C-alpha cells in the first residue's frame, strides 16, 4: 500500500506592492520579512521578483498560533 502526499496548493504570485496590500503593510515590511527568512522572494529574472501569497498566509497563521499559545 502506497500513500501519496497531498499536492501543495498552486502558488499565488504577487508583486511586492500587491503582496504588501494583501496583508496591509508597507512594501518595506515585505523586504524585512525576506531578510529575516520568513518568506522568500522568487526571482524570475534580473528585475522580475514575485512573492507567494500562500507563504504570507502561512507566516500569518504561524504567528497567530504562537500568540494564542503564549496567552
Image (tube, rainbow, N blue to C red):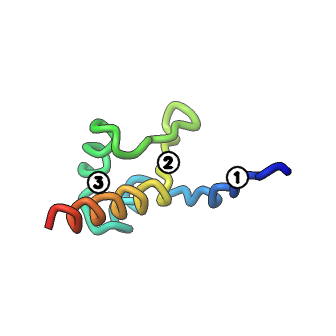
Secondary structure at badge 1 equals: loop
40 vs 4, left or right, is: left
7 vs 31, left or right, is: right
Characterize the local packing of mark 3: few (<14), some (14-19) or many (20 or more) Cα atoms within 10 angstroms.
some
In the picture as drawn, the residue positioned furthest to the top comes out as 46
The residue that label 1 is drawn on is 5
- Residue 69: where, in percent of width, then height? 22, 63
In the picture as drawn, the residue positioned furthest to the front comes out as 1
Q: Quadrant of residue 10?
A: bottom right
- Residue 55: where, in percent of width, then height? 45, 54
Sooner in the amino-acid sequence: mark 3 or mark 2: 3
Residue at 16 percent of width and 61 percent of height: 70
In three-dimensional space, the C-alpha distance between marks 2 and 1, rounded to whole angstroms, equals 26 Å
Q: Quadrant of residue 63?
A: bottom left
In the picture as drawn, the residue positioned furthest to the right comes out as 1
The residue that label 3 is drawn on is 27
Amino acid at each position: 500500500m502506497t500513500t501519496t502526499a497531498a499536492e501543495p496548493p498552486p502558488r499565488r504570485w504577487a508583486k511586492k506592492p500587491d503582496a504588501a496590500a494583501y496583508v496591509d503593510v508597507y512594501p518595506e515590511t515585505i523586504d524585512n520579512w525576506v531578510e529575516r527568512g520568513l518568506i522568500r522572494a522568487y526571482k524570475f529574472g534580473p528585475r522580475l521578483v514575485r512573492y507567494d501569497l500562500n507563504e504570507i498566509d502561512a507566516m500569518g497563521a504561524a504567528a497567530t498560533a504562537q500568540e494564542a499559545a503564549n496567552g
